[in-house]
Amino acid sequence: MDYNFSEIEPKWQQYWAERHTFKTDIEGTKPPFYVLDMFPYPSGAGLHVGHPLGYIASDIYARYKRLCGFNVLHPMGYDAYGLPAEQYAIQTGQHPEITTKNNIDRYREQLDKIGFSFDWSREVRTSDPAYYRWTQWAFIRMFHSYYCRDTQQARPIAELTAVFAAEGNGRIRAACSETPVFTANEWAAKSSREQQEILMNYRVAYLGDTIVNWCAALGTVLANDEVVNGLSVRGGYPVTQRVMRQWCLRVSAYAERLLLGLDTIDWTESLKETQRNWIGRSEGAEIYFPLANNLSQQNMLIFTTRPDTIFGVTFMALAPESDYVAQVVTPEQQAEVEAYVKAATKRNERERMTDRQVTGVFTGSYAVHPLTGEEIPVWISDYVLAGYGTGAIMAVPAHDSRDYAFARHFDLPIIPLIEGCDVSGESFDAREGIMQNSGFLNGLTVKEAIAKANEHIEASGLGRIKVNYRLRDAAFSRQRYWGEPFPVYYDADGMPQTLPEDALPLELPDVDAFLPTETGEPPLGRAVRWAWDSDARTVTDTARIDYKTVFPLERNTMPGFAGSSAYYLRYMDPENHTALVGHASNDYWRAVNLYIGGTEHATGHLIYARFWNKFLYDLGVVCEDEPFRKLVNQGMIQGRSNFVYRIRHTNTFVSCRLKDSYDVTPLHVDVNMVDNDVLDIARFKAWRPEFADAEFILEDGQYLCGWAIEKMSKSMYNVVNPDDIVAKYGADTLRMYELFLGPLELSKPWDTNGIDGVHRFLKKYWRLFFTGDAFTVSDKAATPQELKILHRLIKKVQTDIEHFSFNTSVSAFMIAVNELTELKCSKRSVLEPLTIVLSPFAPHICEELWALFGHTESIAHAAFPDCDEQYIVENNVEYPVSFNGKVRFRKVLPLGMAAADMEASVLNDPQTAKYLNGKTPKKVIAVQGKIINIVV
RNA sequence: GCCCGGGUGGUGGAAUAGGUAGACACGCAGGACUUAAAAUCCUGUGAACAGUAAUGUUCGUGCGGGUUCGAUUCCCGCCCCGGGUACCA
């Protein structure tokens, strides 16, 4: 009987669906294990062959863990809010909900064909009100929380107001935006609106005037990780800097915890490093520099990581956006400074990046050096960033390349502070050497000088030691339609108020078009029913707004990462109507044991989700501080494009290896018309009308195409659809082939050239069970040789799965099956365990054979066989090479040597003598006259 | 610039507490079965040289050094490729 995958696979997929084979519930007797994939955004293009790689790996792991007796949670869902659906809606008027639903259906259909063991009863969609209700709920909780630096956690905002009423804000240590100090009396004297505005500076979710990445083409702001090189990630439109009042999340408050948490989780070093860079912790000092003239009483506060270089300060530099600018500019310089600031803010980040010219303007003011008392000119330059540190720096041109460039350009003095350093051509940035020209720091190493300078600064009140982070608060408003609405309305003072939690979800309203309004308001400005009736506690018409009981609702929506920040928690308890996740469920599942997804989320989703989880941990909603214990990145599968070569000005195509003799233009050709780089000429002629009468110059009777590795995309005609592979070879072949392609975490091109080998393996495996059409498996006892093959395989596969080296597992299966075929082994005692071991990789074929063995329950409920070490020995000789690692020396002996001569031969060998170095060997093992192992 | 990865046959890739380099697969070549094709199976396949042959010798894991009886693996110095990040003071 032939291996008929097209019959077997749908049959078992249906069986699993009907019996809910992979439905998971809390089971006290089994240990829990949570295997999660990054849920997909369902795009209109559907899945290509690269998408399922991670899902295949996680599915194997999940199935394997089930066989090992774990209660496995393996859910799937959809990140359903996103820009493409909205863009499509703007163009076609089609409601994004409809396109999203269609796309989801298509994704589901494709996923089902690959035979994943997802528990679909737990599916979540971020655009489902029953789901985003909890996204809104978390936002409300963030709004009503502040971050306490003493306890290092989020606390209720009510605690803060109590402290303000009792003693003001002088002593409170909380993460906050810049806020003046006030007393209890001053707090009491403030109006409700003023109090609200102060509290806004402390909230974890707050409204702030922020410099945002504004994308005019998309009509919205973007997060830092949504902008690359000054262009939007989605669409590639230019992005400019602009100040806007936006919802923000105080992610920066969690910077230290986000950094420390990395040491407790099992992620790859490179991914942790990426996050560490992104968080960007740097230790330094904040130092006050008083002004020399009387323009302002206020001292300028600067941040530096090199307090040891303070004697080399020759000028100060302020960011153009800095608040200090207005305070220090002299009337004579006013006009020039204004012009510069205006020009600088107009230049967007992209322009600043592409042309890094040294620019700046003198303010007319001088600062007083806190140690020498010298007067130092204060300049403004756009190389100083307003958003980092204090937006002001002390410039030490001798030891900072940017300060150096500025000093050279404006001819400012340069004072070298390190003995023997040469600053004639460039600055000396290295943190090494002995200090000079530095008063009390002279003679110290840089490291000692930093410590001593810090000590002095703190002791004399010149400033304080300060840790800065590169990590910024997250911009949380988007001027879009297709996202979660904020559960917020604005009162008569224009201050935001949250909806009552029991009024959630606040559902996304209908609009007549998905574009911004004519006045530039976000699309929700078009909604007719988008006001909050606080008496009736319902949404109502905007026409009824009276600012007494009916108020306007927030018109922004939340960004893409909102819905993906806690979805893994919702899977634990998807039916819960009273909480995001119930305590019992969360206590049981705790955290994701294995998370598989792409590296591209390193500084986006994976930071935000960790932040979100830590916030919920502070609230006591979840019991684990880190959400993803182990994380594995699967590599991208690139496309392999094929080309045909048209001779210029003709309709004649020349085969690849002959093309150099002609003047040719390469054309992308659809890879689905090419097999092993050989073009299917008939299909090519039918592809486009202009190719119908094309002529070909062949080699060996074939047309050979050229190829190149490119991104898999429609325009390159190199998209391979998993459905086509499943139809041609079956899902089991697809699954095993994707893994066989190479190590999971490596990027590699999709190349069907090797798929036949994997398919052949499955056919060979199938044939072990049949003689003719009859399923013939004997009950005879297995031979030691057969058991050796089996147990070696069990051991290999087990260690491979634990280490995610699935590609070598596939090879191990091939070897085992080849060996068993050679031995003509069709014994149940060997093939039954083999089938269990293979089932995570190729579940359909194994399920079919499992049933033929006479089992009535799915193979998913079998037990993974134990590996019996006694069979992993060679010919009754202890063979320690691979298994106990005690081998210290090996030598190859000539074949055909008599066993008795082997030991003497080895011991007389000069190389061996050098190895032994006078010692007597404990054991000399000769195996089949080939290899000698000597254990000293 | 800085920080991570990584360079192994015609191809994808195995093998590192130092010990038979190239597992497994693709491709290619030859053969068996077949009227033929498909399918299946067998043999060979890093390079060079020698030999009718079995086989032998030499060279070979990006380049140049080093440590070692022995290096793809460890150390030093380069070159190249991929990823992250970038006026972050």
Image: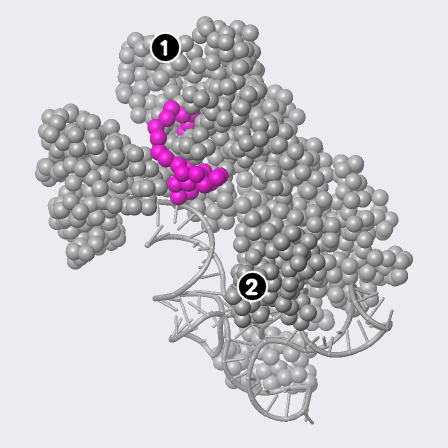
Label placed on residue A469: none
**Closest to the observer: A829 or A236?**
A236
What residue is at 52 percent from the left and 23 percent from the top?
A: A485
Q: Could you tell whether A814 is left or right of A457 in the image? A: right
**Which region is colored magenta?**
A224-251
Measuring from the top left, give residue B38's x and y in whole percent: 78, 64
Q: Which residue is mark 1?
A: A192
Are there few (<14), some (14-19), or many (20+) residues within 10 Å of tag 2?
some
Circle 1: residue type: Ser
Measuring from the top left, give residue A862's x and y in whole percent: 76, 46
Q: Could you tell whether B21 is left or right of A858 in the image? A: left
What residue is at 50 percent from the left and 44 percent from the top?
A: A600
Kindly indicate the quadrant of the structure image that contains residue A406: top left
Q: Which residue is mark 2?
A: A647
Query: Residue A243 magenta-drawn?
Result: yes
Determine the CA span between mark 2 and mark 1.
79 Å
Regarding mark 1 in the picture, which secondary structure is present there? helix
